[in-house]
Image: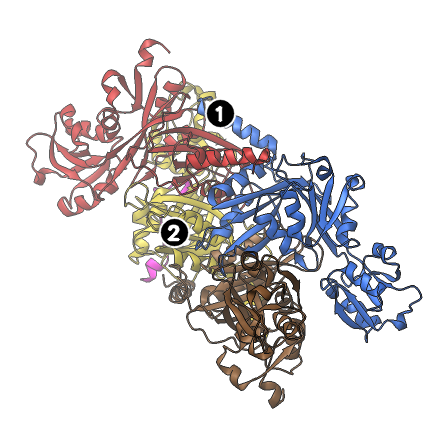
Chain colours: A yellow, B red, C blue, D brown
Amino acid sequence: MTPSSASRYTYLGPEGTFTEAALRTLPESGTRELVPMVSVPAAFDAVRGGEAAGAFAAIENSVEGGVNATLDELATGAPLMIYREVLLPIAFALLVRPGTALADVKTVTGHPVAQPQVRNWLAAHLPDAVWESSASNADGARQVQEGRYDGAFAGEFAASRYGLEPLVSEIHDTANAQTRFVLVGPPGRPAAPTGADKTSAVVWLGDDHPGALLELLQEFAVRGVNLMRIESRPTGGGLGRYCFSVDAEGHITDRRVGEALMGLKRICPKVRFLGSYPRADEIRPQVRPGTTDAEFTEAADWLGRALDGRI
Amino acid sequence: MTPSSASRYTYLGPEGTFTEAALRTLPESGTRELVPMVSVPAAFDAVRGGEAAGAFAAIENSVEGGVNATLDELATGAPLMIYREVLLPIAFALLVRPGTALADVKTVTGHPVAQPQVRNWLAAHLPDAVWESSASNADGARQVQEGRYDGAFAGEFAASRYGLEPLVSEIHDTANAQTRFVLVGPPGRPAAPTGADKTSAVVWLGDDHPGALLELLQEFAVRGVNLMRIESRPTGGGLGRYCFSVDAEGHITDRRVGEALMGLKRICPKVRFLGSYPRADEIRPQVRPGTTDAEFTEAADWLGRALDGRI
Amino acid sequence: MTPSSASRYTYLGPEGTFTEAALRTLPESGTRELVPMVSVPAAFDAVRGGEAAGAFAAIENSVEGGVNATLDELATGAPLMIYREVLLPIAFALLVRPGTALADVKTVTGHPVAQPQVRNWLAAHLPDAVWESSASNADGARQVQEGRYDGAFAGEFAASRYGLEPLVSEIHDTANAQTRFVLVGPPGRPAAPTGADKTSAVVWLGDDHPGALLELLQEFAVRGVNLMRIESRPTGGGLGRYCFSVDAEGHITDRRVGEALMGLKRICPKVRFLGSYPRADEIRPQVRPGTTDAEFTEAADWLGRALDGRI
Amino acid sequence: MTPSSASRYTYLGPEGTFTEAALRTLPESGTRELVPMVSVPAAFDAVRGGEAAGAFAAIENSVEGGVNATLDELATGAPLMIYREVLLPIAFALLVRPGTALADVKTVTGHPVAQPQVRNWLAAHLPDAVWESSASNADGARQVQEGRYDGAFAGEFAASRYGLEPLVSEIHDTANAQTRFVLVGPPGRPAAPTGADKTSAVVWLGDDHPGALLELLQEFAVRGVNLMRIESRPTGGGLGRYCFSVDAEGHITDRRVGEALMGLKRICPKVRFLGSYPRADEIRPQVRPGTTDAEFTEAADWLGRALDGRI
């Protein structure tokens, strides 16, 4: 990696999207070259190829669910690891050319994902406006600038870039809508544990084994590790063949998490560790009695004594 | 419902897509008016509003995974039920204007979902061709007809409609790629059991209950009911709040399935039954000893005798 | 059954034991002919043969554990059912001939089961006394009367019958020692539910099925039924072949209990229902949300509606 | 321990019982001083006090079940460990004074445990003989020698010691009846693994935790460790308070067994390891895929690499 690539972060572009806004919340983003890419695979491949130190993309949205492109890129191809997550509340502004009034807005645009999040607002305030999708929220703003549409739903931060103004702000049909983004990098030592961490992995189940998902969950449950997210993804091997993308509470260096991961590794044909990293919400887990690191250590000491007959 | 709406099926349009091709495999499609709609919600709302007897849409693809629009429409809004499923192998043809040779193809198009399924073929056979996405595979074909692109990836069946010819057929990067479609209708009695059936439901878990997913799976496992698909979907209540869309082997009239559903109903804040219907693959399940209908009946008889002291 | 046998209860004799004392706590014992028998099989066979309406015997002791003769008689032979349980605190008196002082006591006797319960007391107060076992505590008292031993450990109630006096009372090495007794009768309708009930059964597991015990427990757990006692007993088929005698919270007419019993019936080669009867401690169970009778009924109603498409 | 105590084994006496016969099957018994004791506690206390190197007693009988005295002595008091087990088929001989014919046998005796194992034989061949129990089978033989009874049920090997002859041999109502004996010693390194081993432990469950037994079993199940025996014993803390004596397949040095034991240690208030020792039946376990030592090692290596980012 050259000095310049070491200071480069790619992200799913174009500029002016929520992804860029989320990326800019990272402290180091001020000293990085932030490079928009046309797709998640392109952003991630730049890291794989050594042209960037990190790549940034949405992985999950509280309204739309998992972002398949990100989940699938993490599950396949050369391994990458997650080092950071960012949560961004999602609220749209209706961006218009200066001087446009609400009554003038006959056509609106935005990314298809934005549409279900502004549908109710549209029905209430612009029942007659015609929606057409654009490739991204930022692209929609650009098309408003060019005069193709009257209004674009996008992040308020995108207005100035395209010479538009926010006519209405804080539009979101669903309260508390959030998107979760991850910063991925080449495989390396996981981020240091903070006490409020998350561990991600992809787990493939053996074919034709009806109870396999239950067994997967029991590997976590028996060690008191809570699952925060589980998402099935097709393996590409045909309908009915899935892998599972999971986020678990805790850090790989927590004994309960490490033992659960080893359990998965033993019973599943394939496990890909995707990293342990600080939770953006900074919530510390309730560790069930019997599963703290101290208790793991005591139990190992006890076993060692038993092996020596010092019971 | 008027006589005309009773004979109408809506589907996710436009015409000429795989969805229409799948719908036409249903025997009754010959006597129905098949109406393409602009979105899954539009297609399903036509059923809800009594303007159509059924709506047809993809629910799952072996390469791309679950179809969120379909899953979410089934989970929310006025209830609908699934009465039929169709599996369609997905293979693309490269459609061109008559007379076009492979060497002439500089630009290609297709639905974004098609792109990952033809990526390798493109790299091998048309490494220099430029891809641009279109709104649907059929729309891509139309744009080839209009001369905007040189080739469109679409179903071979779309060629004649747009005056094109298939230059190459049976293109699919992933062998055995399939899409699963469902025919939904207004709530009613489930399709009659065939011995090779599937039951679908959406299950909401209580918040802040770490073991809830494990308990959900155990309600199935303890009655010997295999899960064929489980897909988490956000409830819209914020990150970390999920419901699960599940397909289980068997029919609601199978005692083991009925008892498992009642178990879910008791432990979960909300369960939506989506129907029991014949499996398109016609595979009959291996029923675990102790979970056949006959054994359920025997056990109920035994309990009845025990209640009377006839042990 | 003749009128006289209908009013007869057998019990494990001889007279003057804790068993008789426990039996006399039953209100109806005053109007029954109470017949001591030489063994548990003899007492139970009298019921099987129609010579007695009930038989009374200890089933469990908080110091010594399960009473094998009772457990095995209930598990094999012609079926019997439990209709009542009695808890009796176990405290011994040292019975002596009138005029005997503690310093005069050189030899003591009692049933072998009594010995571990008075061992510490003996070590502290009569360290030099010689213990010899007798066939029952009552038989020990008789032998003191006859002058063969100086003191007998027995229930204080046995003193007058043998012309002895209690020299020391309330002797018990273990605080809260209790024995549980059961009244068994011919199979019939279980005792009416009181809200604080217990259900007993014997369950045989299939051979060579390592997870069978776990499955047995899961049939209870998934329906929220707590097990209060589980005792393995050999089936007689060789080492490693066991059946399990279990007590569960609740009454067979509780929906959660009935469904769990049917689950056992389906997965186990053999289940013997031993009755539902009031708990002597009158503790009402904490019923887990999702497992009340009302929730079972609601879930059944919901399933019925789903079968009709009224979702 | 003095030289003489180092070569001394105690056992539950008296001489001439099945226990002595089982002990004599151990190769080293020929070079040990074998000392009969009056009770299991006495035999075990001799080891605790350094007066003997080992103690030998029955722990389980395929007809009568667990031997409470042995189970309870292992669970309480100063720790001891099991180093060896012996299986002995149980068949009785009817021992009589020389010259006695079957028709002369009017009274018979034997240990109470022997009685259910010869009951059917007696009913068939000596329906009118009167049974009285004696303190041990050997003691019964002694009383026949003294002329108090006409016949004693005992091991055939006891005949010569008491000047008796076996009138009938191989008496056993239950085919394949066996007793399992254990050799216990002071705590020390477990016996070396043989590939066909057994691990014993006593596990106390937390009070008032309904699912505790299920959790105990799951600690074993999730690591693929089969339980061969589980026996509840009262803790002495009152009815409903139990500990469990368990035998598991495998050796403490097997990774799956060690991890399961550590799991128990963490979730249970108290665990007492009782040793790992060769199975007398020499049956090697079927180790479930995912739970071999090699797979444990691979998984640990994989985790180590993940901690370093070498995924």
Q: Is residue B115 above or below residue A267?
A: above
- For residue C198, which numbered disc appears in the image? none
Q: What is the quadrant of residue C7 in the picture?
A: top right
- Tell me: residue D255, above or below residue A132: below
How many circles with numbers are drawn on the protein? 2
In magenta segment, residue C297: no
Give the residues in magenta: A1-19
- In the image, taking residue B144 as reference, residue D238 lies left or right, namely right
Assess disc 2: are there few (<14), some (14-19) or many (≥20) residues with their C-alpha within 10 Å of its C-alpha: many
Judging by the rendered image, the residue that carries numbered circle 1 is C304
Quarter placement of the N terminus of chain A = bottom left
Residue D26 image point, x, y percent:
50, 78
Give the residue at x 39% y 53%: A184
Q: Is residue D29 visible?
A: yes
Residue found 16% across the figure and 31% down from its top: B156
Q: Which residue is mark 2?
A: A202
- What chain does badge 1 belong to? C
Instruction: Respond whether the residues carrying marks 2 and 1 are from the same subunit.
Output: no
> Circle 1 sits in a helix, a strand or a loop, which is it?
helix
